Image (spheres, helix red, strand yellow):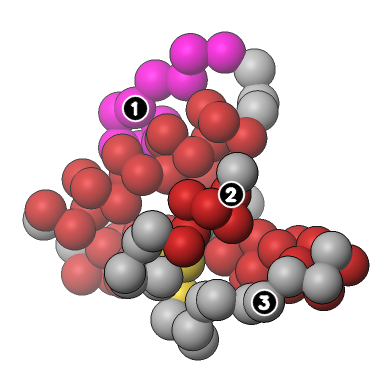
Amino acid sequence: DFVNWVNNIKDKTLCGQHIIFDVLFLQNHFKHYNLVWQFKRRLVDLHSIFYYHLLKNNVEIPDSGLGLDYIIKYLGLEKRGIHNALEDVRLTAKAFSILLEK
């Protein structure tokens, strides 16, 4: 289903929190199932966008890191439930939307 969905998308830029983890996961599965890797080398990482946002706004970078939980709390977003991929994707997309609007 994912591959069929990707086939219908013109811009195949991958976005996410620490996106390289997802890219390596996807590449491994594409290779395992003999699927053609359709993505280019265009990656947008929420961690980097958020880091820039903090620098630009003179906000101290916490030593504890910039994980998704920290980012969504900082942006005033609310988690609906326990950690799961669908919820994290929704929150990551919302965080991108907020940060890129600014």
Q: Where's residue 65, x and y in %?
A: 59, 56
Q: Amino acid at mark 2?
A: Phe
Q: Quadrant of residue 10?
A: bottom left
Stretch of the chain drawn in magenta: 71-81
Observer-nearest of 62 and 66: 66
User: At numbered mark 1, what does the secondary structure look like: helix, strand or loop?
Assistant: loop
Q: Amino acid at mark 1?
A: Leu
Observer-nearest of 55 and 2: 2
CA–CA distance in space, label 1 to label 2: 27 Å
Overall secondary structure of the magenta stretch?
A: loop
Q: State the residue position of label 1.
A: 77
Q: Quadrant of the C terminus?
A: bottom left
User: At numbered mark 2, what does the secondary structure look like: helix, strand or loop?
Assistant: helix
Q: Is residue 72 visible?
A: yes
Measured along the vertical axis of the image, is residue 101 above or below residue 33?
above
Observer-nearest of 85 and 34: 34
Q: Residues within 10 Å of mark 1 (few under 14, many from 20)?
A: few
Of the residues under marks 2 and 3, which one precedes in the sequence? Answer: 2
Q: Is residue 76 magenta?
A: yes
Q: Where's residue 45, x and y in %?
A: 46, 67
Q: State the residue position of label 2.
A: 2
Of labels 3 and 1, the one closer to you: 3
Q: State the residue position of label 3.
A: 36
Residue 52 is left or right of residue 37, and the answer is: left
Q: Residues within 10 Å of mark 3 (few under 14, many from 20)?
A: few
